[in-house]
Amino acid sequence: MLIFIRIFLILYGLIAAGTGFHAMTGPYDPAIAPMADNSHRFIAAIWASLALGFFYCAWFPSEVALFRFLMIALFIGGIVRAVALVHYSPTPIIWAVILLELIPTPILWYMHSKLIASNL
């Protein structure tokens, strides 16, 4: 059970670090308003910073509060992405991301709770 949790935490951490760094350092697009670009880069930096939390929880699984915060953040992100689908047609990658945020997170929460209850 612990290895499954660690694999997903590292996967989420790598995704957060990679996509966050890519969005932070991408070229400026003049078609986007400067404030929108600035906000996008700020959110990307926060997302990339969450990678540290994912990696920390992977190495220290007894960190309950941080683990739960990260799972809630991912789940809410998945809900927001799903609700946004009323505005556009999703691509397969958007579906994959939504499912990666909505399906594993409650399973990981449950598994982590059982692991903590058994004193790791």
Image (cartoon, rainbow, N blue to C red):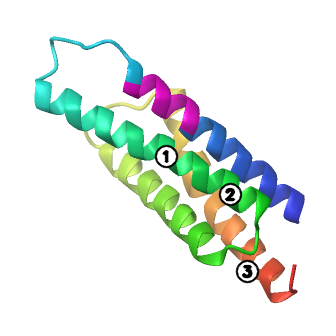
Between circles 2 and 3, the one closer to the viewer is 2
Secondary element type, mark 1:
helix
Q: Which residue is mark 2?
A: 56
| Quadrant (top left, top right, bottom left, bottom right) of the C terminus | bottom right
Mark 1, other Cα within 10 Å: few <14 / some 14–19 / many ≥20? some
Secondary element type, mark 2:
helix
The percent position of residue 104, horizontal first and vertical second, equals 67, 57
Whole-angstrom CA distance, mark 1 to mark 2, is: 11 Å
Q: Who's the residue at 60% across and 36% down the image?
A: 15
Magenta span has 23? Answer: yes
Identify the amino acid type marked 2. Answer: Tyr
Q: Which residues are magenta?
A: 17-24
| Quadrant (top left, top right, bottom left, bottom right) of the N terminus | bottom right
Whole-angstrom CA distance, mark 3 to mark 1, is: 24 Å
Identify the amino acid type marked 1. Answer: Ser
Q: Is mark 3 in CB contact (under 8 Å) with mark 1?
A: no
Q: Which residue is mark 3?
A: 113
Q: Which residue is mark 1?
A: 49
Quadrant assignment, res 41: top left
Frontmost residue, 107 versus 117: 117
Between circles 3 and 1, the one closer to the viewer is 1
Magenta span has 4? Answer: no
Identify the amino acid type marked 3. Answer: Ser
Frontmost residue, 28 versus 77: 28
**Does residue 75 lie above or below 41 as drawn?**
below
